[in-house]
Image (cartoon, grey):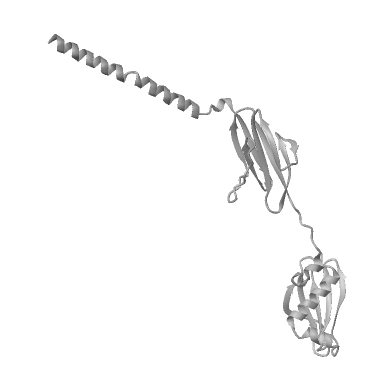
Amino acid sequence: MILCMAITILTTACRKSKSNPTEPSTTETHIENSSADVLDISNTVLLKIETEGLGYVAYAEDGDTPAFDEEYPAQSGYVNAMPGTRFTISAKASEGWIFMKWTKDGSDFSVDEQIEIVVDQSVCYIAHFDFIEEENIQMTEEQALSAIKSYCYADNPELEDMVKSGDYTIYWEVESSVDDQIVVLYRSYTGAELHFYINPVSGDTHITEFVKGITDGEQRTDDSFNAWDYVDDQALS
């Protein structure tokens, strides 16, 4: 009986000695992994990357090249980083805008679209973009005259051969030209006189017709078009 009790106590003790050492080791491993994965924000600095105007920004760490998302490019970014972390930040203007400069905490910093920085303390970089104002291109008298000829030839495919034949009285001329309007006269082989009133900036054109002995002065027609559509591309260069 005593021998059986001794065997029972020994067996129980052996079981405890096998199970107890494993429990602390599992807990310690779990704690170590958790502490490695969690970044203590109290020890980090905040990098803010923002935009003024229409444009986008991107960043990368440790010498990598920043990449802009093709579908949804970012207009700002906020990063918690350890002091001394190196970043490359890049700016890209939207269509119709141009990149001007980077500022750092309100002061001019760089005019390069892509810059490398070291973040030692919380800081804000802003990419500034400016709108591109397109200059108004104004049609010249020569372009207007050429455009009206092209329009007439397109409207009447036989007209060009008629002009070359020399058998008809047909001509075009710039009748007047001021800042906001160019007037081109077309004398048709029928004897009718058509005046083309052209806005030299927008190209909007309307037509009047005068037929001696038939119309009472110029009569505006229902026809209108854009003269820029008939200006030769080579004439624009």
Q: Is residue 181 above or below residue 212?
A: above
In the rendered image, the vertical position of residue 59 relative to residue 184, given as above or below: above
- The image quarter in which residue 17 lies: top left
Residue 136, how many percent across, how many down?
Answer: 79, 60
Question: In this picture, is 92 found above or below 214?
Answer: above
**225, above or below 159, in the image:** above
| Residue 184 image point, x, y percent | 83, 76
Left or right: 164, with 27 as reference point: right
Q: Position of residue 52 (x, y in %)?
A: 68, 43
The picture places residue 130, in percent across and down from the top left corner, at 73, 48
The answer to whether residue 123 of the structure is visible from this angle is: yes
Residue drawn where x is 32% and y is 18% of the image: 20
Q: Quadrant of residue 145?
A: bottom right
Residue furthest to the top in view is 2
Please indicate whether residue 102 sits to the left or right of residue 165 in the image.
Answer: left
Quarter of the figure with the N terminus: top left
